[in-house]
Amino acid sequence: MKAAVRYSYGPIDSIQVLEIPVPEPKANEVRIKVMSATVNRTDLGVLTGKPYIMRAFAGFPKPTKPVTGTDFAGIVDKVGEKVTEFKIGDRVWGFQDNGAGTQGEFVCISVKTAIMKIPKEISFAEIVACAEAAHYAYNFLNKVKLVPGNHVLVNGGTGAIGSAAIQLMKTQGILVTAVCHENNVEKVKALGADRVIALEKEDFTKEKIEYDIVLDAVGKSRFSLCKSILKPGGIYISSELGPNWENLTLALTTPIFRGKKVVFPLPLDILNSMNHIQDLLLKGQFKPLMDRTFPLDQVREAYTYVASEKKIGNVILEISRDS
Ligand SMILES: NC(=O)c1ccc[n+]([C@@H]2O[C@H](COP(=O)([O-])OP(=O)(O)OC[C@H]3O[C@@H](n4cnc5c(N)ncnc54)[C@H](OP(=O)(O)O)[C@@H]3O)[C@@H](O)[C@H]2O)c1
């Protein structure tokens, strides 16, 4: 089978598309013919092993799985002898944030991990775009108490996490102001944002409005800069650790005092996120923002595009085509 492979942590050039043996499922695994994966920011972390903390999860000193890829949507093509939950022909999707080896024509996945069936009306590309970033967005928001009418500012409305977060909050009756580059204002409005700030025109940190939460979904700002636009007791959440991992330190120290604080949520329970997002997708309340699609042979180009920090939402890697 054809797969995107690398044997140590390294740059995008270390990925090669090679012919490798088709894997055999263990007793608790299903083998999946992968139709679509995304190339996302978590994939970049698993590829490069940076930040170094990634290696504690993805393998040390080298990646546990030589095939790249964290998410998948495909068709079960073989089942291990103890598997009862899935059968050959089932359409399934899933995500493992420490690397699942999904950017190849076949992958074996344990049924004890985050894997679930895809409803027939949803395409492989659409569902796989609901995995990585939507899981993070959901986890950032479900770690704080939000009530209808709260006002949240999302920095990075076009990012995969930001675009998912805007939509998730609109299902909860939250007032959302989003920040993005001027050329993407209409795209972000279409996601449901109540107000959009073009970052070339206005510095959102100088606003007179006070927010309940500032969600820095692209990790480009800082708590110190956003403090003045938070209400008393307001919360700053960033998707990045920040300079010298300050967001982690601030998440430990700011709750000691009764003021504005930083929350640095740990994204857990992927299956719960998948269930929630799939449900919203079926109800028409969530639609993943999708960017370019690359074939497997252009996997390096896909990673290069994602590393440019210019993607709009999710980048799809088409691994196999419906026959
Ligand atoms: N904490 C976690 O568990 C976790 C997990 C996954 C990812 N992350 C991190 O979360 C961040 C977001 O990931 P993602 O996949 O959502 O990002 P992404 O999709 O790669 O973000 C790219 C988008 O961000 C926009 N952007 C770039 N600079 C901006 C700025 N200064 N202000 C506003 N928007 C800006 C870009 O818009 P333009 O094209 O208009 O520039 C582009 O649309 C990354 O830093 C990633 O490493 C954290």
Image (cartoon, helix red, strand yellow):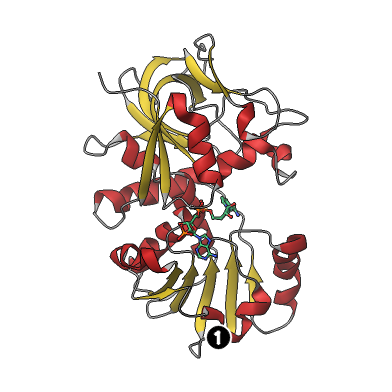
In the image, is residue 122 above or below residue 1? below
Measuring from the top left, give residue 118's x and y in whole percent.
31, 35
Instruction: Identify the residue at horizontal 50%, vertical 25% (top origin).
Output: 109
Measuring from the top left, give residue 122's x and y in whole percent.
26, 39
The mark total stands at: 1
Instruction: Identify the residue at horizontal 50%, vertical 72% (top origin).
Output: 145
Instruction: Identify the residue at horizontal 52%, vertical 57% (top origin).
Output: 139
Q: In the shown orientation, is residue 32 left or right of residue 17?
A: left
Q: What SS does tag 1 mark?
A: helix
Is 53 in front, or is 281? 53
Is 218 in front, or is 231? 218
Outermost residue on the top side: it is 21
Measuring from the top left, give residue 45's x and y in whole percent.
63, 42
Outermost residue on the left side: it is 121
In the image, is residue 49 above or below residue 227? above
Q: Label 1: how many residues lie within 10 Å, few (<14), some (14-19) or many (20+)?
A: few
Label 1 is placed on what type of residue? Lys
Outermost residue on the bottom side: it is 208
Measuring from the top left, give residue 210's x and y in whole percent.
51, 86
In the image, is residue 143 above or below residue 297? below
Residue 114 shows in this picture: no
Is 142 in front, or is 319? 319
Residue 137 shows in this picture: yes
Label 1 beta carbon within 8 A of ligand 1: no
Q: In the shown orientation, is residue 260 left or right of residue 127?
A: right
Q: In the shown orientation, is residue 51 left or right of residue 152?
A: right
Quadrant showing the C terminus: top left
Which quadrant holds residue 33? top left
Question: On the image, numbered disc 1 is attached to which residue?
Answer: 206
In the image, is residue 289 above or below residue 140? above
